Image (spheres, grey):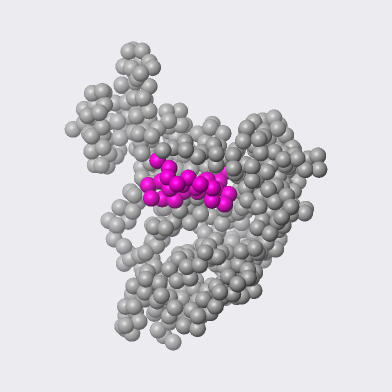
Amino acid sequence: MDHIPRVSEVLYVGVCREIGTPTEVTFRRDIWDTGEMIRKPSDLYRGVRQMLSGSSREGFRFKSSDWDYMQWFPDHKVICEMSQSTFYHPPRHTLIYMETSDTPPGFARLQLLTPSNQEIVMSSLKERNNTEYISSLLLRMRYHQSLNGNDPVHEGENMHGPCHNYKYKSFEVDIALCFHSRHCPLPALPWVERCLTRVWPSRSVLQTIVNEGFHLVPIANRETNENSDLEWRISFSQAEQKLVYSMNHCQFLCYGIMKIILKEIISDELLCSYFMKTILFWRIQESSSTPWIPSTLLHHVWFCFKSLMQCVYTGYLPNFFIPENNMFAGKVVGAQQMSLYQKLETFYNIGVAFLLHSPTLREILIPALSNPYLVMPTGESYLKSEIDIDIAFCCESYRVTGDPVKSDFLANMMHLNVIDQLFSTRHDVIFHVILINVLASTSMSLKAQYSCVSKKRRSTIDRSIIHMLGLVLKLGCVSDGLYLRNKRYTCTIPVDIK
């Protein structure tokens, strides 16, 4: 059986190259975390917080990965118990009470306790038993209507579950308007106890998850009939992100392989990558006796696949945070369930060789299977060159910082203020890259003020722009200089770029 660890290590190396090395995955996460940290003050000023969630935020860069965003009003506070209302101050805060007493596990109703300053919330109210609740159906419809057609570059806009969905530059984007609570929901308290007993995640990660709270997403349980438009799904997207961050790289690659298996081998609309993530969470928490290292990767992948089979056979996949919530309920049922199980059973009978049905994994595994003496080192320096890592870093930085022409002067000034404060404690390259982009963006937004200011004021603006562009040239790389040199020919400001 010596070939199993060897094939497993080859799989680890190959998937590392496909999905990313530990360094790549880390800087992908750090860049997005830093970007959101810098944008937080301007988001609060606008009254809408935004967070990237899902596989893109977790560190994956599959071509098929979509971009999932969650938006919420930071002054709307969801409480789980009435006693928690003492932490907030109406009318500065809008209070919403989450009811879970007679709702399906993992779902809640939202009772509006104090008036909202948001028209979309007030127009989504529905009365039941002389109590006003926020309708998930009405809110997501109104949110879709408010965004539909606003930006001409957004293609194929439609409603997708709880989200407003569209395509932008070949990327699929989902945006959900939800509500946030900083309290731990009562149905999830047993999960906290379980984590302390099973010792995963660590106490520090668990404390961070509990402190950051959860979201409520506007979608009802599939099996609810009466008053389903009042139900909201309890979402642990922030907690899931922290759990994925806490994984070692072998665990993260196992997650990636399960996503590849789902897309390239199983390819069934009944299943989604969230189910794969849930199965992996359970596996990590219950597998303390088996180490997560390159030589055991294949073993864990096979176990996760067998767990998926068992869940499909029983029609029961317990939610990791609220196990009473069966995520297969109303979806993996009936004839489609049996057909899916038969497909999985066919792959099971083949054994781990079923991985060869995936074009991606077949290309990785064939060299190891055809050469019994092949041994591939798993050190990170062997996997990718520093040049490739630098290129990937620059591409990822551009994803976060965006196009400097699209700018907002007030937001940029807030961003500069945050960067200035953070530079006193952190000097990593991520802040450096974002600073360069914000300086360029601020100069562009200043230029946009020309038409509505006096000549004297224009002179002051010119000096500010020249100073900021000079800093960009001094701090930036060659491409920043080339970009500004090109912009000079469409700019009335006499910037000397040599």
The answer to whether one can see residue 214 in this image is no
Q: Is residue 476 above or below residue 301?
A: above
Q: In the figure, residue 389 lies in which quadrant?
A: bottom left
Q: Quadrant of the N terminus?
A: bottom left
Prevalent SS, magenta region = strand
User: From the viewer's perspective, is 202 left or right of 422?
Assistant: right
261 vs 424: above or below = below
Q: Nearer the viewer, residue 356 or 27?
A: 356
Q: Is residue 140 above or below residue 188?
A: above
Check the image and name the residue furthest to the right: 129
The single residue placed furthest to the bottom in the displayed view is 1
Magenta span of residues:
153-177
The residue positioned 33% from the left and 17% from the top of the image is 458
Locate residue 47 relative to residue 387 in the image: left or right. Answer: right
x, y percent for residue 144: 55, 42
In the rendered view, would you say 347 is above or below 438?
below
Q: Quadrant of residue 135?
A: top right
**Residue depicted at 22% across the width and 29% down the height:** 489
The quadrant in which the C terminus is found is top left
The residue located at (40%, 76%) in the rendering is 356
Q: Is residue 157 magenta?
A: yes
